[in-house]
Image (cartoon, helix red, strand yellow):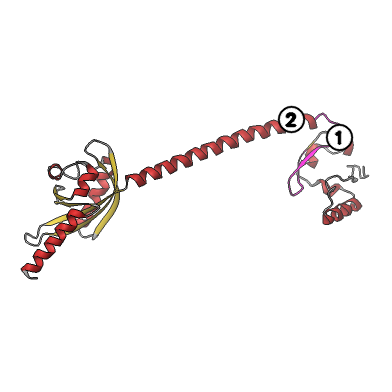
Amino acid sequence: MSIDQRLINESLFIQAFKYAPIGMVLVSLNGRCLKANPAICTILGYSELELSSLTFQEITHPEDLILDLQLMTELLTGKRDSYQMEKRYIHKDGHTVWCLLAVSLAQDEESHNPFFVSQIIDISNQKQAENELREKERLLYEKDVHYQISMTKHLEQIHGLYRMISDHVLDIISISSPEGVTRHISPAVRSLLGYEMDEIVGTKMMDLWHPDDLLAWGKRCLLDNPDVNMFICRIRHKEGHYV
């Protein structure tokens, strides 16, 4: 490469480094800032001179430092060509700045000394939006849980009221699943049909219907009769006769 071409390349690099919209830092192997562009100074609140007196370890959040050092070691030992991570920096005024960091290893052409090239994007707004979304999801979840608890209590009250009524009426009152399986039946089943409550719960009451009435019910269902829920039928007593 000619001297002129080299000077052109260096000039282009300096311009790109200076005017890059993202933070760029050249870092020595011991973590010292060799050169920083204006964007990273804006992100972290330090001047380039102030950054040159600091190491990246000093401005990295303690909880993110171990992973950063581990990845840097893998970069130096050739286990990886570059690495990328989300990490927190400590701003000059003390608050945390979330950034997306990409690091690669370069070498000075004259001294052949290696150094790190760090590219840094401020993602604090994105992180804040993610946290706000998680908080909204948490509040919605808690609201849903509270609603379910409230509805459960309400249903328990209704069920308790139903039990109180069904336990004292002279007629048979039952609750069945959509499949027709009896979930609860009032004590009147003893006096009217001769069965104990436990003998009916878990079975289908329709199995006790008179065959002719069961057939008539089926025809009504096929005709989509609006009075299908009002139906008089005969039910087999425990002794065998129909009531």
Task: Give the answer, above or below, for where 47 lies relative to 81.
Answer: above
Q: Main secondary structure of the magenta part?
A: loop
Pick the residue in front: 30 or 13. 13
Asked whether 182 falls inside the magenta stretch, the response is yes
Q: In the rendered structure, which disc, 2 or 1, sits on the residue that comes first in sequence?
A: 2
Mark 1, secondary structure of its residue: loop
The span picked out in magenta is: 167-184
- Percent across and percent down for residue 137 are 48, 42
Say what secondary structure mark 2 lies in: helix
Where is residue 121 shown, x and y percent of the image?
28, 50
Left/right of residue 15 with respect to residue 146 in the rendered view = left
How many other residues sit within 10 Å of disc 1, few (<14), some (14-19) or many (≥20)?
some
Instruction: Identify the amino acid type marked 2.
Output: Leu
- Check disc 1 and report the residue beneath it: 171
**For this view, does 78 lie left or right of residue 206?**
left
Instruction: Please name whichever residue, 151 or 168, is drawn nearer the observer in this view of the structure.
Output: 151
Q: Is residue 71 above or below residue 10?
A: above
